[in-house]
Structures are given as structure tokens and as C-alpha cells.
């Protein structure tokens, strides 16, 4: 669950530190896979999900990020979310549907910038098919990947508590 303004609070309290990636050399890092994917700017194509596809060059962008792990000798364990409850409020779902419908109207009228904004709001950019492709791509490259029974964050917290990973890369709410 997201904690509003946590990042800014942690920054204000000087609880966020920056270190060289060298500090993670030969460390096993638990990675919230979807959070990691959302951090890759090149994958943010709002039209891809709306049109039923995936961003062009997906595997090249991911491989470029993986090279950083290899270069710094970081051992990632990618954790993918399992079964998650659906939206609790139908108002949230209907708002997304309205945004998608509005996006298509803008596109039909030739207003591409407005359509792009609406598509960006109505799509997650990291849909189930996308995650499935990435899971199998990572495994084919020899990376350790697991699908948590439920939330990835809970699985990562368990692994950290058990000493199976040295640290976690995920949203600030995992603290």
C-alpha cells in the first residue's frame, strides 16, 4: 500500500542516503520487479497498453538495465507479485474506463497530446502480459525470478527477515 508523501518526509528528515553502487557489489538484492520496471523511463509508452501491445524495444531496454547489475556485480532476485485483490471501489474502475473512452475520442479527433495524457492515466503501462514476458525474459537470461503468492513487498520483507537477501529495491512504503 502506498504511503502518501513518505519520500518527501524521509528526505526532510535526512533519512535517505546516497551511496555508490560499489556498496552492493556481490550482494543479493531483492527487487520488486514491477517497481523496477516502472523505474525504467524508456518503457513508459502510454499508447502501447492502450493499443494492446508492449513498448517497442522492450527487451533491449530491460537488457540495458540488467547490464548495470552485471557491471556492478550485483546479484538480483526479481520478485513478481502474485494474486492481488482487485480495486476496492467501483468508482476507481469507472474513472479508468472513462479516461480510456475520452482518450479514444481525443485520438479520433486528431488531438494526440490530449489522447496521450488520458491513455497515461487509464493504463498501468505494466500489464499482466508485459510482466509475463519480462518474467520469462529474465529467466532465459539466467536471472533468479519468483512469483510471490500474494504481494511482492510482503515476500521481499520475508526474504529480508530470513536473511535470504541483503537489501531490497522497492517502493518507499516497504520500509
Image: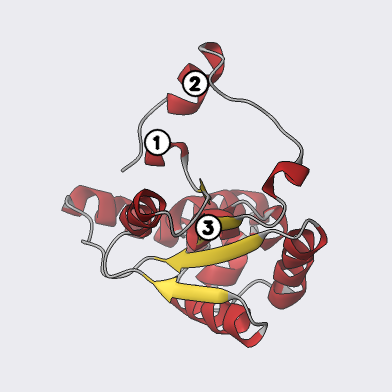
Q: Position of residue 155 (x, y in %)?
A: 34, 59
N-terminal of the two: label 2 or label 3?
A: 2
Please name the residue that numbered disc 1 is placed on: 175
Q: Residue at x 55, y 19 (%)?
A: 11
Q: Position of residue 120 (x, y in %)?
A: 54, 53
Q: Residues at badges 1 and 3 in contact (C-beta under 8 Å)? A: no
Mark earlier in primary sequence (1, 3): 3
Q: Looking at this view, is 23 or 175 the one in front?
A: 23
Q: Gap in Å between the C-alphas at discs 1 and 3?
A: 14 Å
* Distance Cα–Cα, label 2 vs label 3: 21 Å
> Residue 112, percent across and down?
66, 56
Q: Which residue is mark 2?
A: 10
Tell me, yes or no, whether the two marked residues, 1 and 2, touch with CB atoms within 8 Å.
yes
Mark count: 3
**Residue 81, label in figure:** none
Give coordinates of residue 124: x percent, y percent. 46, 59
Q: Which label's residue is closer to the chain start, 1 or 2? A: 2
Q: Residue at x 82, y 61 (%)?
A: 71
Find residue 42 and report its image quarter: bottom right
Disc 1/disc 2 C-alpha distance (Å):
11 Å
Tell me what residue is drawn at x 74 percent, y 44 percent: 21
Confirm or deny contact between disc 2 and disc 3 (CB under 8 A). Answer: no
- The residue carrying pointer 3 sits among few (fewer than 14), some (14 to 19) or many (20 or more) residues within 10 Å by Cα, namely many
Secondary structure of the residue carrying tag 3 is strand
Question: Which disc is residue 31 wearing?
Answer: 3
In the depicted structure, whether residue 1 falls above or below residue 119: above
Which of the image's four quarters has the C terminus?
top left
* Residue reaching furthest to the top: 13
User: Left or right of 52: which side holds 160?
Assistant: left
Amino acid at each position: 500500500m502506498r504511503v502518501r508523501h513518505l519520500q518527501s518526509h524521509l528526505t526532510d528528515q535526512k533519512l535517505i542516503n546516497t551511496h555508490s553502487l560499489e556498496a552492493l557489489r556481490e550482494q543479493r538484492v531483492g527487487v520488486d520487479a514491477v517497481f523496477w520496471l516502472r523505474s525504467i523511463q524508456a518503457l513508459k509508452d502510454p499508447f502501447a497498453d492502450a493499443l494492446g501491445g508492449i513498448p517497442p524495444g522492450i527487451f533491449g531496454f530491460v537488457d540495458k538495465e540488467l547490464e548495470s547489475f552485471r557491471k556492478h556485480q550485483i546479484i538480483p532476485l526479481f520478485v513478481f507479485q502474485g494474486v492481488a485483490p482487485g480495486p476496492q471501489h467501483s468508482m476507481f474502475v469507472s474513472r479508468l474506463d472513462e479516461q480510456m473512452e475520452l482518450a479514444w475520442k481525443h485520438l479520433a479527433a486528431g488531438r494526440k497530446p490530449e489522447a496521450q495524457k488520458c491513455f497515461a492515466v487509464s493504463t498501468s503501462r505494466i500489464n499482466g502480459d508485459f510482466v509475463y514476458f519480462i518474467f520469462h525474459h529474465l529467466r532465459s537470461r539466467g536471472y533468479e525470478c519468483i512469483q510471490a503468492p500474494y504481494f511482492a513487498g510482503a515476500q521481499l520483507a520475508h526474504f529480508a527477515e530470513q536473511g535470504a537477501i541483503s537489501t531490497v529495491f522497492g517502493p518507499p512504503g516497504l520500509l
